[in-house]
Image (tube, grey):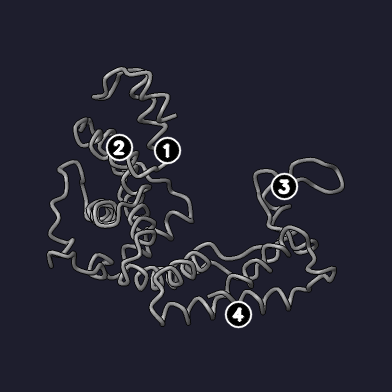
């Protein structure tokens, strides 16, 4: 994985500087570097690295796009036309993009499942959040959201991939709160719960806290937020600090604690 880390650094340096040690790399070299990185991720995963499967899954989920002319990552929110200086629209951006890897969310889910089977909390959180988003009644109707939800619907239950907990009980037996209205939401909640409670995963704890807050479950909100803050999750520290500052959501007003959190 040390060699993989160096390859990733190489890709990042190409994206940022368009050169490595004074020599530009053409499209074929960039493509080969990306393929080598993906191959090493897969090798690492097969040798037991959950992080390797998770990182491979992210590459497959998002794809890999660089600027065709200067090999810099294209950020659609602030990309400017080099001739006019005006912000480019989506069509203009796509014209200057070089897609080294097309997104493949079905393959990504296979990699995430393997990461989850090895106990990767980041993969549990990522996939769980996708399930919750698809299960929400107000989910957007864009093509990307539709594709994601279709893949999740047609994927074997990822919950089955989660290793049993130390007391040999399956996460599938976890009781779900009554405000979850469908199987998508229940699967997402179970994945986040396992990441949060079995792995002390800060983002999962924070996500669950906000979910309970949205459904007026003040006690569970405070318990989850306090735990997330206690392990140092930045967003949770800020939110808990705000609660201490204003004396809201079950927290006593305490400026000293608020300042400590901030």
User: Which residue is label 1 attached to?
Assistant: 235
Disc with the residue nearer the chain's start (1 vs 4): 4
Disc with the residue nearer the chain's start (4 vs 2): 4
Give how far apart the Cα atoms at labels 2 and 3 are.
37 Å
Give how far apart the Cα atoms at labels 4 and 2 are.
41 Å
Disc with the residue nearer the chain's start (3 vs 4): 4
Q: Nearer the viewer, residue 66 or 44?
A: 44
- Of tags 3 and 4, the one toward the viewer is 4
In the picture, measured across the screen, residue 116 lies left or right of residue 167, that is right
- Secondary structure beneath dot 2 equals helix
Image point 20% across, 33% down: which residue?
217
Q: How dense is the environment of label 1, judged by Cα within 10 Å: few (below 14), some, or many (20 and up)?
A: some
Q: How dense is the environment of label 4, judged by Cα within 10 Å: few (below 14), some, or many (20 and up)?
A: some
Disc with the residue nearer the chain's start (2 vs 3): 3
Image point 73% across, 78% down: which residue?
28
In the picture, measured across the screen, residue 64 lies left or right of residue 55, that is right
Image point 78% across, 74% down: which residue?
26
Q: Residue 10 appears in which quarter of the rendering?
A: bottom right
Disc with the residue nearer the chain's start (3 vs 1): 3
User: Which residue is label 4 attached to?
Assistant: 36
- Secondary structure beneath dot 3 equals loop
- Position of residue 11 measured from the top left corner of the image (x, y, whole percent): 67, 67
- Of tags 3 and 1, the one toward the viewer is 1
* Residue 133, above or below 224: below
Give how far apart the Cα atoms at labels 1 and 4 are.
36 Å
User: Which residue is label 2 attached to?
Assistant: 225
CB atoms at circles 3 and 4 under 8 Å apart?
A: no
User: Which residue is label 3 attached to?
Assistant: 79
Give how far apart the Cα atoms at labels 3 and 4 are.
29 Å
Q: How dense is the environment of label 2, judged by Cα within 10 Å: few (below 14), some, or many (20 and up)?
A: many
* Residue 37, above or below 238: below
């Amino acid at each position: 994985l040390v060699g993989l880390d160096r390859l990733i650094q190489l890709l990042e340096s190409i994206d940022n500087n368009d050169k490595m040690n004074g020599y530009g790399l053409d499209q074929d070299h960039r493509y080969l570097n990306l393929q080598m990185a993906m191959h090493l991720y897969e090798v690492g995963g097969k040798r037991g690295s959950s992080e390797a499967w998770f990182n491979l899954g992210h590459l497959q989920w998002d794809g890999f796009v660089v600027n065709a002319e200067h090999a810099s990552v294209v950020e659609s929110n602030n990309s400017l036309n080099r001739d006019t200086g005006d912000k480019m629209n989506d069509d203009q951006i796509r014209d200057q993009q070089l897609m080294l890897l097309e997104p493949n969310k079905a393959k990504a889910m296979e990699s995430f499942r393997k990461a989850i089977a090895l106990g990767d909390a980041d993969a549990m959180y990522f996939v769980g959040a996708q399930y919750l988003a698809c299960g929400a009644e107000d989910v957007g109707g864009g093509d990307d959201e539709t594709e994601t939800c279709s893949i999740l619907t047609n994927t074997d239950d990822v919950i089955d991939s989660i290793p049993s907990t130390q007391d040999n009980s399956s996460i599938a037996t976890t009781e779900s709160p009554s405000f979850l209205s469908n199987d998508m939401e229940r699967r997402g909640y179970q994945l986040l719960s396992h990441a949060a409670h079995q792995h002390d995963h800060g983002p999962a704890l924070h996500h669950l806290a906000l979910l309970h807050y949205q459904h007026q479950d003040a006690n569970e909100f405070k318990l989850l937020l306090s735990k997330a803050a206690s392990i140092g999750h930045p967003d949770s520290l800020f939110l808990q600090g705000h609660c201490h500052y204003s004396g809201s959501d079950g927290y006593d007003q305490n400026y000293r604690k608020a300042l400590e959190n901030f």
